[in-house]
Structures are given as structure tokens and as C-alpha cells.
Image: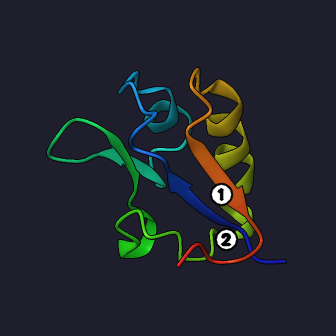
Amino acid sequence: MATYAVVDKSECIACGSCGTSAPEIFEFDDEGLAEVIYSGDNNRGVTDIPENLREDLQEAVESCPTECIKVDDKAFA
């Protein structure tokens, strides 16, 4: 099953927990907010996160204090 992720930047407080848990998936943008960067996704939520990174993704979701990381089995855009 496919897994897609996106960060709701309106809820992000730039704490860095997602980047610590899953640095291959998340990074900060020019405004200092987290975004999905995996495979050039640019926080669109259209790139399938591969199986080998899903444990890191789950850890990032669980560590996010504002729950701004959204995950679904369908693309967001």
C-alpha cells in the first residue's frame, strides 16, 4: 500500500522533531517550517514514501507536538 505525507504548515511550530526522526523525508523551508522533501515532493504529498522509510515517518508523526504531519494512503494533490 502507498503512503503519502504532507505537513500542515499553519500548525507547524518548527520544533525540528520530524527532521530528527526522519531526515530523509523532512527538512525546513525558507520560512523555517517543516516540509516533506523526499524525492522532490516539495510538501505536495504526492510522492509515495517507500517501505524502508515508513518506520521513520511513523516516529516523526508520533513525535510532532502539534500533529501537523498528515499521512494517508492516497496522494494529497
Helix, strand or loop under label 1? helix
Looking at the rendered structure, which numbered label has been put on residue 8? Answer: none
Q: Position of residue 49 (x, y in %)?
A: 63, 68
Above or below for 58 versus 77: above
The reply to whether dot 2 and dot 1 touch (C-beta < 8 Å) is yes
Query: Which residue is labeled 2 in the image?
Result: 50
Query: Which residue is labeled 1 in the image?
Result: 53
Q: Is residue 77 left or right of residue 48?
A: left
Mark 1 neighbour class, 10 Å CA radius: few under 14, some 14 to 19, many 20 or more: few
Q: Amino acid at mark 1?
A: Leu
* Residue in front for this viewpoint, 18 or 12: 12
The span from disc 2 to disc 1 (Cα, nearest Å) is: 6 Å
* Residue in front for this viewpoint, 20 or 36: 36
**Residue drawn at 52 percent across, 69 percent down:** 45
**Residue drawn at 40 percent across, 39 percent down:** 10
Mark 2 neighbour class, 10 Å CA radius: few under 14, some 14 to 19, many 20 or more: some
Q: Amino acid at mark 2?
A: Pro
**Residue drawn at 42 percent across, 74 percent down:** 39
Q: Position of residue 24 (x, y in %)?
A: 46, 54
Q: Quadrant of residue 54?
A: bottom right
